[in-house]
């Protein structure tokens, strides 16, 4: 089995049932998630061996976070325990013209206050083929930015592939800070993943339009962005997800990939959404899976888009689908008919 | 802060979870609502000072009704307690080709049997700018019709704006009775709000079509109706909501306004519905808000339609959105993307 | 009242809330259903007298199955008790590009191991006008195939109409076994009901296309199939439901009927799905209702399609709609507006 | 099978989960119950054939009431449909020093406004051995008092046993009115059932204590009451349940029986309560069962007390226990150990 | 109406259903509470006018906290909005030998970081008769200790009664720190309330036993403690709640009061517990109510103990009982019988 | 860390909420458990390294079983996948005089039909100190009895401690069959664990009483049984749990241990029960923990009884308590007070 390591925060996610607003909630659903944990679980469901590295408080909420990820087969032996609290995020699901909403309460978390010696990268990377993190991890604290760099360097030295999803979060850092830190990490990253806005936010690589038009994506303009990123920052591959938001209930979803030479464009799926949080992470997981399975670039991209298309139909941040289910969609075998 | 007074019934609303039918329900969700309470809560969420006037029984259900409205910041000091029972309505949510259904059990309610001296309109209207009621209130009993008249007269005497949503309910009174009573109240009403059918049902003002075609609205024909109402009944402004029902799951929603001189037409929203009950009330609230904020007619109408568009995405009869969220939709800033 | 007898398995149905996957379930909704029980309940809701014949274990789960069907007014006096266990099926609801999924755990069930003398067909058919079963019943065991034959013969001898929904289940038997058994039963069947694939699976009557295209139905080609079935197997009428699966969330739904002479085609409904399991059964019930009400062929077909269209909006396998609600849809009276 | 007929109101029962108060409820559990419906269901679970006679409105709530009773095997063919509304009762479960609480909203109900010709007693009593009603039924309206009398006379004429549980409800009528009406019915009643307070409230037969002491029952004094009732009103048997209320969580429960000659006293059970509503009804059902099984007086009493002891452990108003389970408790076989 | 002001933190309380542990929770019940908010709500339910003063973040969780308190009629006009986050506490209910458990995540909360000018004590205390806070408020930050002092001084200057519940929390401050701060506040406090351990923890006033024996309380020894507190710190009255913990499910509950001259001892209640969190707060509320109603010392104490006895039967931190219900228990009228 | 291996079935456990009966359930809680899985999870929570060996079907229910155990840190690498179905058990919680009830549907399960080469005992036992199984495993099939024997022999050969909990289940095998099979396994078992009835059921070792009196345990008589077992079957240690069932709600709980020389008796706990299923397994886990921690016999027994006492307060079959929580109870530190 291929072994993938991901590194980042895992938060307590609290959300009302169905489409209730936070101000209407009498109870909140309990889940534990974070971009890198989501990628680890997705890959685990696809059949990969995965290790999730993080830090959680030594209390019931921290232990529950470990339990939650571990149930799906992710190795949590390198999640260390300590610190003050677990980061929390409250979220309500949007519908129709009302957008989904996220309220973060993640400051002072165990992972944000972690120290370099909480993580033994030599041990963590033993027998690993891949290391994945997102721009959220170095954004959490200066310490974590440093620890990320250290992890990247260790990975590189061991010949491990490194992928990074930019995942820009304006609540965590400014664009300027993001650019400075991410530029230091970029040289160690083989594959850069981003959504429509990230490249512009983090690296100031614009798609040429003055303002992003989220309801109609111009695919060509993103080729320019991808190429720029590859050339200026040395990424071997750049993948960009392309979402057309018709409403909070209906989106069109596709992605593109640039390998330094050619551009690859996926099919676009018209999706009636159940839950879209975590779709970017499921795309990253699909792409890593494709590359580790030695799929060619087009197949890897198609697999990642089909996998993340399915994520939109699944509640929670984890993409709980098997590789067979993704292949089924790719082969267009089901047409949404009941699988008996 | 602007202060708005609304007057009407608040009922116990009992509804099954999700799309279950009433005959499938093992438990029923508890809410308390009514057209005028809905308007008060909507306005309160938009930042206005609101007073809801009603009567509920002096028991746990009556007290819970007060608590339910009060939690959203509505002043309930003038809800008096007494009488026999609280009105109840059972409702199930429709979907696809199956319509939503409402079963009323509202006879003999505390408010229907209220007496004139339950309400001290002089005190209630102190510092108020606006009085709103709907055609449901005078329909509940002859006493209430009289009390409404008294309230309207007091409001007028104090220079308070009066708005009325026709809200014709055939289970409560005949068209003939409605016409007689509403015609007595009309002279005190500045702004008349109605949906496609109300004008015809209550005042026999027809849009000229033999039968209403609910799946495709002819906007022009409603201009005729609005004008007729303004001229014959002396309303300063007439607003009509226009709903195209594709199915119980998908509607197109817009509205028009006539100010005695000009016609204003809003944008039409294609809405994938979460819960449409209360959308008319949220429109009324939006319109009142707009006028009290001194928006011009077009902006007031647009705000009201955007606010009520959002209501369709929210569970329950109350439109729990802020003015900022409505403005966001008006400015088309979100495209349904996650608000982090 | 017209009396209809149906015969088949009733299973414990366990399903997660909303769109959760089985691997995410912390609790499972409890229902009891099966193709023939579904038809009985549907007919009972339409106002018919119904008798459901089956066998369940003599324990709490068996008793609960009886209670569940009985609550909707179905006569369960001929459900005998004994055997080892109740069949179970686990199901999760699909959405968007993810198909619904069913996991059967129905082997060794009370009904599958039933014996001929568990059922007294003479008594059961007293005063009955109609007998309905589906291809699932004879597929459960050789014993049951024999019992079905016996029931069919008794019904025929008493001049009772017999209908059969092919309902091919590949997990229960091979196509070859199905063909052999169903061919022995066919001579006793007056009306054969099938979906797009059944005719081909069971009788090898192909619509002429090499592969079924589920997202776009060619109605004409199914006329050929229906005619072939009527001619070769002697059915008096053949009805075929036609589903176009856009996704697990959106389907187009219609049906056709052949009476040995003419072809009848229904309207097609575009449906945003709440729950599609049981829609085929609700079609069968609608058709039986139409024929027993002496509707003509076109009206019977239209009623059956409208009834089963409504089923897609209802949670659970039973079509809990009244005849009046179906007529309303046929007459296009509601447009999905609230029924107050 | 023995056939028992019961006659009375069935109400929609709405109650919060667990120990929540009504003012804390966000949803309410839906059940349908009433003293005579409870007795019918209890007897049905014990293996008897039962018929429940009532009137419910012709709407979804009325139909759900029928479904709810019918699921447990009670014959509901003589529940007629019509009238304005279903009676409702709201209830919250007490605990420790806080008493359970019931809020009735039962006025204007279908049954309270029923007419004599809604019930065909000749048909209803065909093949019946027993007729049971409680003091609640004649208390609902003068019409119902008259209908009760008519039912009693018809039963008597047909040699059917008649039992009546006094069930005095001060919210429904005064003691004086109760005495007048019940005294007219008494001559037709063979077996009179009461709790500690009923005899005093209805017939002014006092246990000799100035005030009831509910936390410690003096069994002897109730013998006097029972004898008085038998002598003055001509009951053949009188049964009185004896409850010692330590708190809302813990009660001691027993009963006595007088057959005109001898006094019988049951064992007393110390009960940690799950739900005590309906325990009196389950006692009546147990007693009727005992007599119909031809148990002797002591065994009948013991069975009734054991059955109603078990009711305290069961949620809802129905005593869902089998005769075997009651016998097990009588034989003291289980000691509360797991039954695998 | 008498007006009482309370001042302190309101936290988001998250707890699993029933007796589930936090590590088993798939969802968490949402409530908002805090010692001083609990007292305000209790007093509001008893019929008093109450004002709760606090600070919450300007987000959905902060607004929900206001809504939650406000629904019960508490005036929240002086809860200011701002700061970083709302304090959170996670709690699971104990049973039998397993203790209840609380995990605090309250650092960096809006109230802990509040500033002196967030509160206008002159305006807040207008028309007030009573000011209540607990030892938790000054423990949250040095700023808050200072603000408390300021509030106390303003209250004193206005002739407002001041009560303080010691409520020692070892997670918030050391005993030494507590002693220093509380000793500065004590001179402004008229009535000091404490539980068995507080007096020792905060002021080092020992009951003379080397170690507290929580399963059997020696009432006499607490008289010594109360007297010491009154004499050394100048409290006019000292009340101490006395809890005997048999297990997490069963407690004995009583209290004592010292008025500088005499000792008053309440009845002891044996309580089978539903939820004991907030019982101390409900005692404080009961005592304040008694004094404001001008009950004598014994009656005030008895009322407070009966009120807090009832709290143990109620879910959540608020004591949702009316004065009439408390009086009923005092008069021993109910014996836990159903209140119809 | 000490490593313990357990081997047995894991079933899908389906149970209604709270005290509802199975015939009242609209949904069922989903858990996965089995005697040996319960022991593994308990030991994992106490801080031990654990391996659970079993076989589950290769479907969503099988995978969910693995996930459920794995979340608590148990190594599931040796749970093989295949076979037809997962065993199921339905259970309802008893209360007061009503016993808990279990309905098994475990025939034809994956584990019951497992083959010898599904398990590689050499690999499984690598680095293990302890092997535990119960009498249920060999009872499931002859194959499993053989596989158990093989496992025992391998364990013995590797110097691994072997413990066996007799766990007699009359639904699985006769006493005679049990005696034959268990007598073959006994020579490999070091520590035999049993409840009051097992020794008699399996080995015919009677406590001398003609009939077991479950409501009052005579400890002395069990010493005789323990000694007999040690002498005749060669167990090094024999532990017997002693339960006095006052009702389904209240039990007294203790245990005894015999080490071939001396008898040890634990404290007895009076327990108000939340959920008693799994308490025997939690005792076994506590005992194994004690021995592996090198506690002396008395301390090991006391620890096991305290641990299993706490289990009675926890919902579900797993004893989710830490070693520190058990020690706290042993040291009597909490008295059921809130742990803040």
Image (spheres, coloured by chain):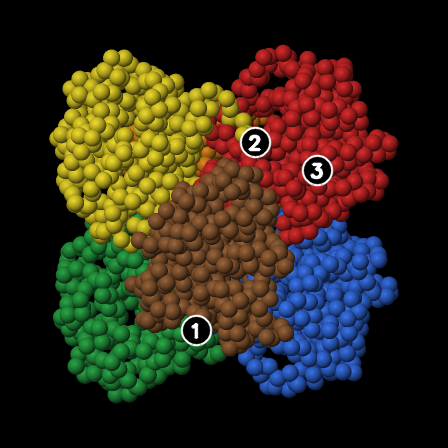
Chain colours: A yellow, B orange, C red, D blue, E green, F brown
* Label 3 crowd (10 A; few <14 / some 14-19 / many >=20): many
Residue F152: percent from the left, percent from the top? 47, 52
The residue tagged 1 is F261
**Circle number at residue C8:** 3
User: Image point 64% across, 22% down: which residue?
Assistant: C201
User: Image point 51% across, 35% down: which residue?
Assistant: C93
Residue F136: image quadrant is: bottom right
* Label 2 crowd (10 A; few <14 / some 14-19 / many >=20): some
Task: State the CA–CA distance, disc 2 to disc 1.
Answer: 61 Å
Of residues B65 and A114, which is closer to you in this image?
A114
Task: State the CA–CA distance, disc 3 to disc 1.
Answer: 63 Å
The residue furthest front is F157
User: Image point 16% across, 75% down: which residue?
Assistant: E187
Task: State the CA–CA distance, disc 2 to disc 3.
Answer: 18 Å
Q: Is residue A332 left or right of residue D322?
A: left
The residue tagged 2 is A340
Residue E16: image quadrant is: bottom left
């Amino acid at each position: 089995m291929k072994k993938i390591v991901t590194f980042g925060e895992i938060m307590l996610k609290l959300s009302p049932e169905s489409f209730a607003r936070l101000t209407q909630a009498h109870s909140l659903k309990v889940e534990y998630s974070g971009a890198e944990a989501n990628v680890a679980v997705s890959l685990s469901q696809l059949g990969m061996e995965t290790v999730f590295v993080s830090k959680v408080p030594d209390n019931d909420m921290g232990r529950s976070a470990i339990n939650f990820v571990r149930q799906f087969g992710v190795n949590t032996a390198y999640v260390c325990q300590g610190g003050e609290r677990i980061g929390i995020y409250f979220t309500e699901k949007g519908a129709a013209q009302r957008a989904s909403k996220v309220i973060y309460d993640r400051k002072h978390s165990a992972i944000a206050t972690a120290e370099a010696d909480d993580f033994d990268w030599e041990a963590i990377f033993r027998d690993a083929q891949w290391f994945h993190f997102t721009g959220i991890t170095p954004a959490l604290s200066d310490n974590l930015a440093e620890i990320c760099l250290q992890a990247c360097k260790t990975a590189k030295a061991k010949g491990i592939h490194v992928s990074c999803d930019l995942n820009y979060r304006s609540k965590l850092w400014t664009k300027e800070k993001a650019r400075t830190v991410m530029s230091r990490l970029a040289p160690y990253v083989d594959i850069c993943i981003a959504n429509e806005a990230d490249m512009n936010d983090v690296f100031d690589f614009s798609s040429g339009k003055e303002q992003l038009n989220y309801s109609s994506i111009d695919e060509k303009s993103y080729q320019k962005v991808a190429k720029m990123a590859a050339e200026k920052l040395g990424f071997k591959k750049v993948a960009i997800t392309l979402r057309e938001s018709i409403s909070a209930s209906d989106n069109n979803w596709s992605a593109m990939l640039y390998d330094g030479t050619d551009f690859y464009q996926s099919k676009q799926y018209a999706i009636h959404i159940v839950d879209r949080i975590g779709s970017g992470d499921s795309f990253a997981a699909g792409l890593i899976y494709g590359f580790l399975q030695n799929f060619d670039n087009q197949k890897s991209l198609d697999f990642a888009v089909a996998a993340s298309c399915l994520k939109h139909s699944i509640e929670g941040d984890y993409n709980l689908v098997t590789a067979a289910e993704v292949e089924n969609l790719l082969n267009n075998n089901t047409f949404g008919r009941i699988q008996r």
